[in-house]
Amino acid sequence: MELKRVVVTGLGALTPIGNNISEYWEALKSGKSGAAPITYFDTSLFKTKFACEIKNFNATDHFDRKEVRRLDRFAQYALVASDEAILDSGVDLDVVDKYRIGVIWGAGIGGLETFQNEVIDFAKGDGTPRFNPFFIPKMIADIAPGNISIKHGFMGPNYATVSACASSANAMIDALNYIRLGYSDIMVTGGSEAAVTQAGMGGFNSMHALSTRNDDPQKASRPFDANRDGFVLGEGGGALILEEYEHAKARGAKIYAEVIGGGMSSDAYHMTAPHPEGKGVIAVMKNCLENSGLKPEDVDTINTHGTSTPLGDVAELKAIKNVFGDHAKNININSTKSMTGHLLGAAGAVEAIASILAMQHNLVPPTINHETADENIDPELNLTLNKPQERKIKVAMSNTFGFGGHNACVAFKSMDE
């Protein structure tokens, strides 16, 4: 069976450094940090007092008050990002076959704020089980793709992928395959997360996963730096419209890039720590290369998982050297988490969008906040430190890994050829 070609025809983003695609790209290329003191709740008793929150976002600008009450923030972010992507795609929803349009969306946690608040309210009461009737529908991860399909009438495949921080990358790979195999013409895919809550911050702090650089939040996310001390929690959403190539060409759609393949693997090692030699990461990148029909020397850039954790950054770079050999030093390696923080289940989509925009503009966004070289990292690797670098990009890869050992890698190719 000949697989159909799949292209990206629409993008949408709501991130800590920009509330749409244009703002996001401007911030990426200028090396803007999204980290700042938390405004959502009192952090005086928390170890970490900062995060990468969405700025200048008012839900009532996008939803009526009744909708706001019925939507957790993660679902609000999903709807806003997907609306931008659908509009950007230029698809005429009055003429397309909506049975051939699906939604696959990633969320690692889902409605954490809703769950937290409902349980706190119950605990404060007299034990009578009084819960909001929207508690469950607001909380469950699959409500995001459900709401997107309900809003637009999309009647194709519809579900959520949950694989911690790899969730939206897995969603993109699933969406790619539904189109490749001829089951759908268009898929809305991506991910969203809203875990900047008391429960989210407290839980990650208890694991010693978060940076505690409270005196200088903007420089806290510092992938590959010797003095990195954990990731910075972020929130937001990213959406991509994937479309069968001939379908897109027939309607005269603009095309950002071709999605040429994806790989998946498991570390099978530890609940939260990566394998020290990056065995699962080696496997996922090799799987992605094979699935994409690429040779290692074809790859120009890799947007790494690069969370700014002591173990994870080193393991990933070891894996890159293993897979790409001598070519590794010719690749522009970067981590946009240095700017956005870690968006958990939304990371894969938001970072894939960064890779696509880099390809569009032939400019690799920087890994910011790097000050001190890590002796465990090969100095010959080009980590795109502190400043963007101009480069003709034909092939870009994006890595995303999640607690539980879930690994996903997606590859994109320029349509210039």
Image (cartoon, helix red, strand yellow):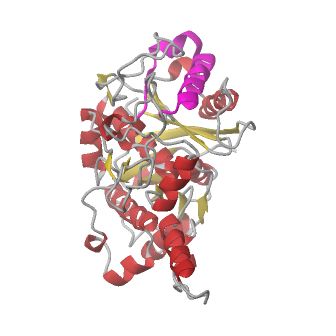
Residue shown at 59%/50% (left/top)?
Answer: 164
Residue shown at 52%/65% (left/top)?
Answer: 112
User: Quarter of the image holding residue 324?
Assistant: top right
Q: Quadrant of the C terminus?
A: top left
Looking at the picture, tell me which residue is in the foreground, 238 or 272: 272
Asked whether the viewer can see residue 43, the reply is yes
Q: Is residue 239 left or right of residue 133?
A: left
Residue shown at 37%/22% (left/top)?
Answer: 384
Residue 154 x, y percent position in the rendering:
50, 70
User: Quarter of the image holding residue 72?
Assistant: bottom left
Looking at the picture, tell me which residue is in the foreground, 14 or 227: 227
Magenta highlight on residue 290: no
Q: Quadrant of the N terminus?
A: top right
Residue 148 x, y percent position in the rendering:
46, 69
Residue range (magenta): 308-336
Magenta highlight on residue 316: yes
Vertical order, 348 against 19 (above or below): above
Asked whether the viewer can see residue 98, the reply is no
Residue shown at 61%/51% (left/top)?
Answer: 174
User: Quarter of the image holding residue 161?
Assistant: bottom right
Q: Is residue 269 left or right of residue 57?
A: right
Give the main secondary structure of the magenta stretch: helix
